[in-house]
Amino acid sequence: MWLVAGLGNPGKRYERTRHNVGFDAVEELARRGGQPFRRSWRFPGQLAEVREDAHRLLLLKPRTYMNRSGQALAPVMRRKGLALSDLIVIVDDTDLECGRIRIRRRGGAGGHNGLKSVIAALGSDDFIRLRIGVGGRPEERDMVDHVLSGFAPDERRVVDEAVVRAGDAVWCVIRDGVEYAMNRYNG
């Protein structure tokens, strides 16, 4: 089993914002698998499980805010007996052009508070992360305001396409390995 965690903020206020593209990506995977998210009573998150062939994916949307994502993710990992090699974390990235995706085998948080929380909770940065570009902030805008804002219509179209590609990339990682997926999707 794999755990695929999409990071974001809970609540209607944050839906479809730049910071919630991780949620958008796991929702895409759940939609493809025909499984709805359900609130977990054991973990602070919503879970869905999808299967394809011999592969099982447990999808997680933490109910904690972005900066506390590790508080939801680490207990799921422990309870399910998953190794770091069984984890894919999907997040937004302001350093990537809107709509680009980037897969990495491991690495630091790169200034992303959600990843910082996950790394701290797991005690390691040795897990796969898939970043979805949401575009850099304009100079006159605060970073927090930028990531909590919505997309312009032309950006939204590009990001929606990236969310679909991110779903394809997750399945590619699982079926073909992270190196193959990096070569195919990192651009």
Image: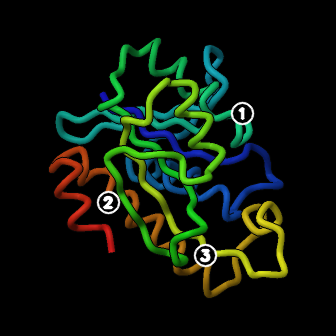
> Mark on residue 73?
none
Residue identifier under label 1: 64
- Residue most extreme to the bottom: 154
**C-alpha distance separating marks 1 and 3:** 24 Å
User: Looking at the image, is mark 2 or mark 1 earlier in the sequence?
Assistant: 1
Identify the amino acid type marked 2: Asp
Q: Position of residue 72 (x, y in %)?
A: 61, 26
173 or 13: nearer the eye? 173
The dot on residue 135 is: 3
Residue 167 percent across, percent down from the top left? 38, 57
Q: Quadrant of residue 37?
A: top right
Q: Quadrant of the N terminus?
A: top left
Sooner in the amino-acid sequence: mark 3 or mark 2: 3
Q: Say whether marks 1 and 3 touch (CB < 8 Å).
A: no
Question: Is residue 158 depicted above or below 83 in this figure?
Answer: below
Residue beneath the point at 49% across and 24% down: 123
Q: CA distance from mark 3 to mark 2?
A: 21 Å
- Expressed as whole percent of the image width and height from the top left, the position of residue 62 reads 63, 35
- Image coords of residue 19 (percent x, y): 67, 58
The residue located at (62%, 87%) in the rendering is 154
Q: Residues within 10 Å of mark 1 (few under 14, many from 20)?
A: some
Confirm or deny contact between disc 3 and disc 2 (CB under 8 A).
no
Image disc number at residue 168 = 2
Label 1: state its secondary structure: loop
